[in-house]
Amino acid sequence: MTMNRFGMLLLAAVTAAGVSGCATKNYVKSQTAPLIEHTGQLEDKTAANGRAIRDTDDRAQAGIKQAQGAADSATQNAQNAAKSAGDAETAANDAVHRASSLDSVVKGLDNYKQMADVTVTFGFDKAVLTQDDKEQLDSFAAQLGSAKSYILEVTGGTDSTGPAQYNYDLSQRRADAVVQYLASKYNIPAHRFYLIGIGEDKEVAPNDTPEGRKKNRRVEVQLLTNMSDAAPAGAQGSGR
């Protein structure tokens, strides 16, 4: 009887211990679960804050690059504007100088005499010198070595085909072609040239025939000098 009571007491003690241990684990678990959950939330917030910081930094860097690009562009535009202004001022000064120089020449034109001349013709709608044109200009330029105080009057012309404004531009290009050839090959300074592009305004032959139109597609060059004792030289016109 005593042994049975002892066994029952022992069993009760063991059961109580087991129940107590289980209760302790459940208590611990109930206490730590919120901490784990809170820690997870903190980690999520930390990660979100990190992403937000990186995103803000990326936007800031992009803004800085954009602002720097705009500043560089503004600087370049300012430099271009300054250069354009400088070029315009230089061109204006050159124009004034040219006008003054031309004015002084025009006032003394009565003292100039024609020493020689040459005429070269061009193909339809062309402004390129042929080999024959260059040979004629070479013969004409051979006289410049002995000329003193001279100017070269270069007059470009066209036939009547096409719009008037286009013909003015074409006649100017033809005169430019002659000037560039003479200036580059014979080192003639720019101030000795006086170009006139007359387009179709001053024809030298009727424009109603192919031969007449060919003669009007020309550039005439006159050697003028104000040396009173200079003897006139023979004309070098092509006669075409």
Image (cartoon, grey):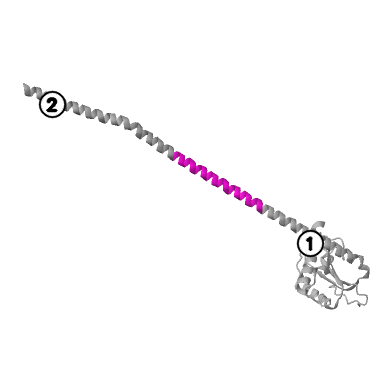
The answer to which of 174 and 229 lies nearer the viewer is: 229
Q: Is residue 206 visible?
A: no
Question: What residue span does the magenta drawing correspond to?
Answer: 47-75
Residue under label 1, please give it: 170
> Is residue 215 inside the magenta stretch?
no
The answer to which of 170 and 75 lies nearer the viewer is: 75
Give the class, few, some or many, for how many residues have Cα within 10 Å of label 2's Cα (few <14, many ≥20).
few
What x and y, as percent, mark residue 23?
25, 28
Residue in view at x 78 percent, y 60 percent: 91
Residue 152 appears in which quarter of the rendering? bottom right
What x and y, as percent, mark residue 97?
83, 63
Q: Is residue 188 left or right of residue 44?
A: right
Residue in view at x 32 percent, y 30 percent: 31
Mark identifier at residue 10:
2
- The amino acid type, in three-letter code, at marker 2 is Leu
What x and y, as percent, mark residue 140?
82, 75
Say whether disc 1 or disc 2 marks the residue closer to the N-terminus.
2
Residue in view at x 10 percent, y 25 percent: 7
The answer to which of 174 and 164 lies nearer the viewer is: 174
In the picture shown, does residue 81 fall above or below 106? above
Give the class, few, some or many, for how many residues have Cα within 10 Å of label 1's Cα (few <14, many ≥20).
many
Q: Nearer the viewer, mark 1 or mark 2?
A: 2
In the picture shown, does residue 39 fall above or below 236? above
Q: Quadrant of the N terminus?
A: top left
Residue found at the far left of this picture: 1
What x and y, as percent, mark residue 12?
15, 24
> Is residue 50 inside the magenta stretch?
yes
Q: Secondary structure at mark 2?
A: helix
- The amino acid type, in three-letter code, at marker 1 is Leu
